[in-house]
Image: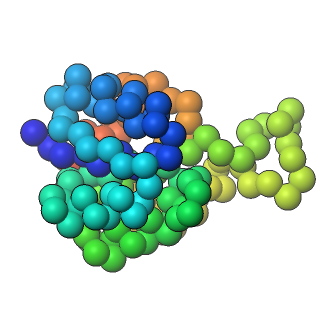
Amino acid sequence: MPLVMVIDDEPYVCGALKKVLERAGFEVQTAPGPEEALFMMLKREPQVVITDVIMPKTSGVDAIKTIKSHFPAVRIIAISGGGSIGIDNYRPNSLDTSAYLAAAKLAGADTVLAKPFETRELIDLLNGVLATA
């Protein structure tokens, strides 16, 4: 059973993803931030990390760089719903979700997914990155 690490500063997101992924047959660990996740990963390396991009303290982009430097074999899925989406929510000088996800991809994420997403989308992406590992 593949081990998946979910990193998100929103407890309800961690809890929801844990429940969904466990039902799909994955073993799941959660962490409220990259620092806690890295500590846990030293004890047991996951096959895949799913990380939010926008978090306090350490951004997901920085987390991806750190994870890839210490655990190059770990596959990473970056998720984000941050920034402004579409013309109705435009805020001057803000980044949109696609910019955050592009930054995550450049930092080393294997794939990205914009929030909100369907659970099937996430599970398909997860299976896809596991198949290429």
Asked if residue 4 lies left or right of residue 114, the reply is left
Image height of 83 relative to 72, above or below? above
Q: Residue at x 23, y 22 (%)?
A: 23
Q: Residue at x 40, y 37 (%)?
A: 14
Q: Check the image and name the residue furthest to the right.
A: 92
Q: Nearer the viewer, residue 81 or 29?
A: 29
Q: Check the image and name the residue furthest to the bottom.
A: 69
Q: Nearer the viewer, residue 115 or 11?
A: 11
Asked if residue 19 lies left or right of residue 42, the reply is right
Q: Is residue 132 visible?
A: no
Q: Nearer the viewer, residue 82 or 121?
A: 82
Place of residue 34 in the rendered image (x, y in percent of width and height, measured from the top left): 41, 60
Place of residue 71 in the rendered image (x, y in percent of width and height, measured from the top left): 25, 70
Q: Nearer the viewer, residue 32 or 54?
A: 32
Q: Is residue 84 visible?
A: yes
Image height of 125 relative to 76, above or below? above
Quarter of the picture containing the C terminus is bottom left
Q: Residue at x 51, y 40 (%)?
A: 10
Quarter of the picture containing the N terminus is top left
Image height of 121 relative to 133, above or below? above
Res 24 → quadrant? top left
Place of residue 123 in the rendered image (x, y in percent of width and height, measured from the top left): 32, 32
Tally of numbered tags: 0
Q: Residue at x 56, y 45 (%)?
A: 80
Place of residue 98 in the rendered image (x, y in percent of width and height, measured from the top left): 64, 50
Asked if residue 78 lies left or right of residue 92, the reply is left
Image height of 12 relative to 28, above or below? above
Res 93 → quadrant? bottom right
Here the colouring is rainbow
Res 121 → quadrant? top left
